[in-house]
Image (cartoon, helix red, strand yellow):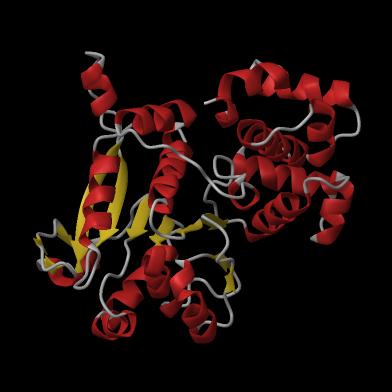
Amino acid sequence: MLQTKPYEVIILGFDGVLGSVLSGALDLFSFTGVSWQRFLDLEVKPKFKVQIASLGGVDITASNRLVIQAHCDITTVSKCDLLLIPTIGDSIDKVLKQNAKLLPHLQRLAATEADIASNCSGAFLLAEAGLLDGKTATTHWGYADKFKSDYPLVDLQDNQFVTQSGNIFCAAGGSAFYDLALLLIERYCGREVSTQVAKTQIIDSKRGSQNSYTNVTLHKPHGDTLVKQVQEYIENNFAQPLQVSDLATIVNVTPRTLNRRFQTSIDMRPIEYIQAVRIEQAKRLLESQAVTIKSLAYQVGYSDLSSFTRLFKRATELTPKEYRDKFSRLAI
């Protein structure tokens, strides 16, 4: 995403919210492009404009009884780049009942294709609004049984730290909130800025399984449902042999039409998207696992090691070994 002005972030405020997560999100996104620059005496350029929005713009009483002033009324927010749903700190059923009038606004903003992200029990608000039906999600392990019982149409992966399903992200809670925030900052501003935030805030990012959000920097919002279907198929099957002609057959169009619609929607051809997803997965594996380069190539769908190495270096300007030496968390 090319940034010409700060991205618009809305944090949903409601009575019973966990105050530390709401204020923590406010700080992390507000100081992106600020803290690192101050430390190095560089020009300050905030990357995000962050506002707390409540129903009617009223003050919010957090679960710890802290009163938080909202910046705006959620009913007047017509669009944003990112909508954050913090953790529910009070009784979940009580908060859902008291904040039922928020749900249409979650649905309304979801229809604008804004990114939406929940932390911990905040996923209950998304599920209550019907936004997680048929999608993958996660929440705190302590709420998993209740969530599965209340929302059987959601594919709950409670063993995951962070999940992504299209433009909807969920974090499991606790320290996973920081993983989610860094992941979203990377989505908008790139890995370098995300790393700067982690360093300035002294956040030790230790993510769980990588597969569910490999495509975080690739899956940009757009309105072509056919292209979305093919993107999701690629993301779920990147390790298998993939041909553009076969992908076109799946969605009943010609390869030429599929190429054109991909170019229009995401400015990439399908073959380029396949390669990008595979390279992103390879980068994640190199960062987090002890794996041989030959095994790595096979895991991400390449039987020809030289082709994989050439594509990886073209994408990153580093060989797989150089990338591992530079970014592997195992060496920290």
Residue depicted at 49% across the width and 78% down the height: 147
Q: x%, y% of residue 39?
A: 23, 19
Q: Is residue 175 left or right of residue 238?
A: left
Q: x%, y% of residue 118?
A: 40, 61
Which of the two residues, 312 or 112, is positioned nearer the viewer here?
Answer: 312
The answer to whether residue 285 of the structure is visible from this angle is yes
Residue depicted at 27% across the width and 70% down the height: 89
Is 224 drawn above or below residue 311 in the view shown? below
Is 8 drawn above or below residue 200 in the view shown? below
Residue depicted at 37% across the width and 37% down the height: 203
Residue depicted at 58% across the width and 47% down the height: 219
Q: x%, y% of residue 155?
A: 61, 71
The answer to which image quadrant residue 267 occupies is: top right
Q: Is residue 241 left or right of residue 193?
A: right
The answer to which image quadrant residue 296 occupies is: top right
Which of the two residues, 205 or 264, is positioned nearer the viewer here?
Answer: 205
Q: x%, y% of residue 188?
A: 43, 38
The answer to whether residue 301 of the structure is visible from this angle is no
Is 150 drawn above or below residue 161 in the view shown? below
